[in-house]
Image: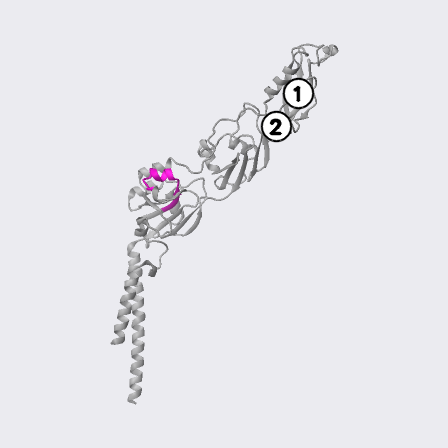
Amino acid sequence: MRIRSIAAIGLNLMGAAALGGCGFIPMSGPASLEVRSGQSTTLPFAVVKLDARAVEILKSYEPNVLGGVFVDRRPPSDIRFGVGDVVTVTIFEAFAGGLFIPTEAGVRPGNYVSLPEQAIDNKGNISVPYAGLIRAAGRTNVEVQNAIVARIKNRAIEPQVVVTVNQQRTSLVSVFGDVRTPVRLPMPATGAQDRITDAITRAGGISANGWETWVMLERDGKRATVPFANLVSMPSNNIYVQPGDRIYLYREPMKFLAFGATGLQGEFNFDAWRINLAQAVAKAGGLFDLQADPGSIFLYRREPRDVAERLGVDVSRFGAGLIPIVFNVSFQDPAGFFLATKVDMRPFDVIYVANAPQVDVTKVLTFLNTAVGTADDGVNLINDIYVARYNSRLR
């Protein structure tokens, strides 16, 4: 009896421990109550109910934009020459007998002379007969033309000058990575206005699927990365290229993670330009019917501070940087499915589906049943040993 009493006390203690803490219960993640509490000993986070207002706020904000980093939306200004550019100077005079056109030049097809092409030297100058050194670097072709005319107008007969670039070695745009023809492109002539997609097209286009391709733009020491699909779906991202831009394309499938009571768990590719939360849950095998709590579907992601404030989050308890937010949507509510179709997934979002409360209760009862059965078997074994010893003494 004493042994049975000790075993009973031990079982009561184990049952209390199992009911009092989740550490005794095997789980694939936190309980729904723990998530909704917004409390953590390691990292603070906010919990936001996914309703129509939250959906509209999220829809109005797109994190992967070039326009947000490069705020100058103006087209490029006129191309300016740089050191190393190769130019040709053509000088026209009103009639023969002037400074450049001899008298016998009447048989020529026109009253002009083209000087040999020359590169702008390291000091930024070109040389023009009777005009001397002319500053070219940092100037447009019109500014160089006017400077030459100003030097020779008192000696030539009503001179006119045309300066053209033969080899543009500055004011280039580099497009490389996962494109068909990596290339350094000269900026188009004055009047033409290339955007990011135009530069990619001039490099032969992308060599991978659009939904797997990312575009990085580097300009003046700043960098920004955007999915290629966003250049097409969001015209505000497709900004004008500027001289010196470096456009790098690389392949990285967009993925999300799914854990908890889903049909499948792990890492999943978007396999499309964009997918919504409902599609992502479906890709993860939907909800596991015998385990999932349809009211406890959580989407983990980080949001900018201003977006978190608009969502009603108290951001004062968070440090600088992005705010960790857990969005909760309920599929018990018929409208939850509609809301889920309005929320676009972002790369490396985490979906977590919590267990239904009764599942955890079943686990505890199974644990206790196993523990009681094991203890009872132990007590029976001890009793059998005592009986065997008692019988041996009687003999």
Do we see residue 113 in this rendering? yes
Q: Which mark is residue 245?
A: none
Determine whether the residue tagged by mark 1 lies in a helix, strand or loop: strand
Residue in the image at 62% along x and 18% along y: 147
Q: Is residue 9 above or below residue 240?
A: below
Q: Residue furthest right?
A: 104
Instruction: Residue 151: name its quadrant.
Output: top right
In percent of width and height, residue 223 lies at 50, 37
Q: Is residue 81 left or right of residue 298?
A: right
In percent of width and height, residue 243 lies at 56, 30
Magenta highlight on residue 82 = no
| Residue at numbered disc 1 | 89
Instruction: Tell how many labels.
Output: 2
| Residue at numbered disc 2 | 82
Q: Quadrant of the N terminus?
A: bottom left
* Measured Cα–Cα span from mark 2 to mark 1: 16 Å
Residue range corresponding to the magenta coloring: 299-314
